Amino acid sequence: MTIELVNTGSELMLGRVLNTHQQWICRQLADMGWVVQRQVAVADTGKEICAAVREALERADLVIVTGGLGPTSDDLTRELIAEMLGRKLVMNDEIRTEIAKFFTSRNRPQPVRTEVQALVPKGAIVLPNSQGTAPGLAMEVPPGIYGDTKSWLIMLPGPPRELRPMWTEHVVPLLKGEFAPAENFVCRTLKTTGIGESRVEEIIVRHLDEQVKGGLEIGYCARTGEVDVRFVCRGPNASACVAAAEKITRRLLRDHVYGVDDEQLETVIVRLLTERKQTLALAESCTGGFIANRITNVPGASAVLLAGLVTYSNDAKEQFLGVSAGTLKRHGAVSEFVAREMVEGARRRTGADYAISVTGIAGPSGGTLEKPVGTVFIGLATRTTTCVAAKVNAFDRETFKYVTSQQALEVLRRAMLESKE
Amino acid sequence: MTIELVNTGSELMLGRVLNTHQQWICRQLADMGWVVQRQVAVADTGKEICAAVREALERADLVIVTGGLGPTSDDLTRELIAEMLGRKLVMNDEIRTEIAKFFTSRNRPQPVRTEVQALVPKGAIVLPNSQGTAPGLAMEVPPGIYGDTKSWLIMLPGPPRELRPMWTEHVVPLLKGEFAPAENFVCRTLKTTGIGESRVEEIIVRHLDEQVKGGLEIGYCARTGEVDVRFVCRGPNASACVAAAEKITRRLLRDHVYGVDDEQLETVIVRLLTERKQTLALAESCTGGFIANRITNVPGASAVLLAGLVTYSNDAKEQFLGVSAGTLKRHGAVSEFVAREMVEGARRRTGADYAISVTGIAGPSGGTLEKPVGTVFIGLATRTTTCVAAKVNAFDRETFKYVTSQQALEVLRRAMLESKE
């Protein structure tokens, strides 16, 4: 089965918007055992949209188009595709009523142009939109129009908040009904930290010869502060093959493997804390709440996170964490000593089992010769010990926050692993 | 000038990674006046990469390829393109030395395979990598090989942390030297909130007839809780035309316009606070530090944000904000009364000019009949007044945090606008 994805939107081509549909739709399909062959993004112009959709229909069994179904004058997909395929647009009264209801239930006047969203190419299946006014559309394109075989064409609205529930509620059942289930397909990603990409391959690859002969594909992806190792296999032995590869890799990389698939360090930490019925407190200066935000993105975080104190000013460090004015004056807010008093204050005042503190210079300004931009101290306190690590993360402001949060969470994870042993 | 972008990586097609290159590179080019016609993503297989690059070279004057230059066995771009274009790969001693230095300076052993990154197709320009080991490559493809005209082919490494400095340091000067400066091109986005997409068009479009006749293109992009209005124009009158459209739109949409281009609510708020020499404190429960994180993403935030208190537990609400145990018991942590005590406590204890508080149920669990998942109370305190707004943001956990933070920041922005008048 060949699948192509076409994302339309001038805002994409002008770099005004991040295309999150690619990852999301590709991931949904991969989880069903189908891999997208090609993804294309083009501007909202008739010429570009038609060319991209036509070429995709010529090659693929399934073409998914996102965007351009809205009510404004730059939303062209519906009309263009109807024209390309020679289908008349028909007003659908049910959708028209739904759209009117959408506005009355929100006490908002209904702009006239919103009615164009109730136009449906003749013979198309309507995919209701529970979150907005533009329905999705699905239609079979018979062989001989574009390419020699039949294709399915599915059009989805641009806003992710509308597209995602529509996918789950309407597209998945349609695909399951129209296409044979994919052959056994297993994809498993091991997430590692603290080790480089080529070193990972050097360590594991020669021990996986047998699995590679059995059809295992190995992929490596270097991310900021992490390397993903991805195993993909198809066929009746796929599960066993991937499981064997995972076992070998875990044995070789040991604690460098912190999770699998979508797990992130914060997921692992909330899971470990929950299992052990332990609690955490955070004292952040330069990361400004980013660590708290990562932890609280994990459902169930409220059972383990007692408090996160974003003490950006010196006064706040004194008042909320009990850092002494003398220490701040003698060593400066960005110092090992302040990191230590912050983390001990956070732990003591909340009674948490673990606390992390972070104080540093995120930049772009504020650096000195002795403490350049990127300087950061990471403190960890348990019920028995405190330690502080010094790093220099010389990145832009947001990368600095990300890398520092990653290091702080890894310090905590390692401490939790050791305390178990 | 025709530009195409090819992103390679099986992790993209499996939905394991978000493709941030598209937005970033498109944006850099748009800022130089050039618009990317087409972006394509394909897996790391020889067949797919060759087909995508070949088709792009046939159509475009400039083809930018990302990914596949690393040291692992799934990094194929360098070899494939050399072969496609009939260029021999030559070991470049200078790069080889740089790679060796990269490892010795970090006290890490050098894996053997990293040397493949010093192979350069004959005649290619090397783009040094200041952040990693894989250099970029640029080469002219003479007419007659793929397409009738000469093309430039630029290959860049996959990790954004390596690609971005390389772009600024080496690709921009190359492009400026090889391509004529783009004709006068102006792109301006007005960011609005609190009003729907078709309502925005309905209000403004008929007042912009004159500008549209003068070549103005108007685009609308609905995002969660916001609508972008984008003006694009080319030619000698572009600036004047876009400026006139902006003036008309601001007059019609008034305070709904909160910023321009890349401005976000947090940027606007930090700017307003900085201009007025005022300060802010945050008391977050269900948003878990997300608001503090947004504010501290803005350079200069340290001058205006005094503290952010992520009081996830009831104890933390009492201890750090002075919320009374009685109020928590009588009304529950998710209540108007607790939001009020939180915001007043945060303002009083820090002495800030403004404080925001948020308490709610992010879900997926924790909802009740009376207070379903998504229920949230947003408090605002100034030196003279306190008010609390109630909302129901029934979304997934991360969207809930985003929408709630957006509402809270907008409450603050409106209060600041009013206090000025």
Image (spheres, coloured by chain):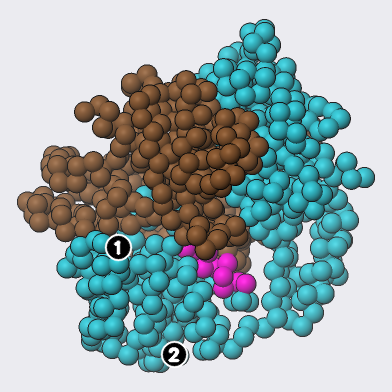
Chain colours: A brown, B cyan
Considering only order in the chain, which callout, 2 or 1, is on the residue closer to the N terminus? Answer: 1
Q: For the view shown, which residue lies furthest in the left direction?
A: A210
Is residue B124 visible to us here? yes
Residue where numbered disc 1 is placed: B106
Q: Nearer the viewer, mark 1 or mark 2?
A: 1
Q: Which residue range is magenta in the image?
A: B20-31
Task: Tell me the quadrant of the picture where the C terminus of chain A can be found.
Answer: top left
Amino acid type of the residue tagged 1 in the rendering: Arg
Magenta run includes residue A176: no
Q: Position of residue B183 (x, y in %)?
A: 67, 83
**Does the rendering let one see residue B294?**
no
Name the quadrant containing residue B47: bottom left
In percent of width and height, residue A379 lies at 43, 39
Figure check: B97 above or below A313: below
In percent of the image, x 48 and y 73: which residue is there?
Answer: B167
Give the numbered dot on residue B150.
2
The residue closer to the viewer here, B73 or A255, is: A255
What residue appears at the point 36 percent right and 40 percent down from the top-left corner?
A411
Give the class, few, some or many, for how many residues have Cα within 10 Å of label 1's Cα (few <14, many ≥20). few
Q: Residue drawn at (21%, 58%), measured in percent from left and top?
A: A199
Q: Is residue B23 magenta?
A: yes
Q: Is residue B300 above or below residue B26?
A: above
Query: Could you tell whether A141 is left or right of A290 in the image?
Result: left
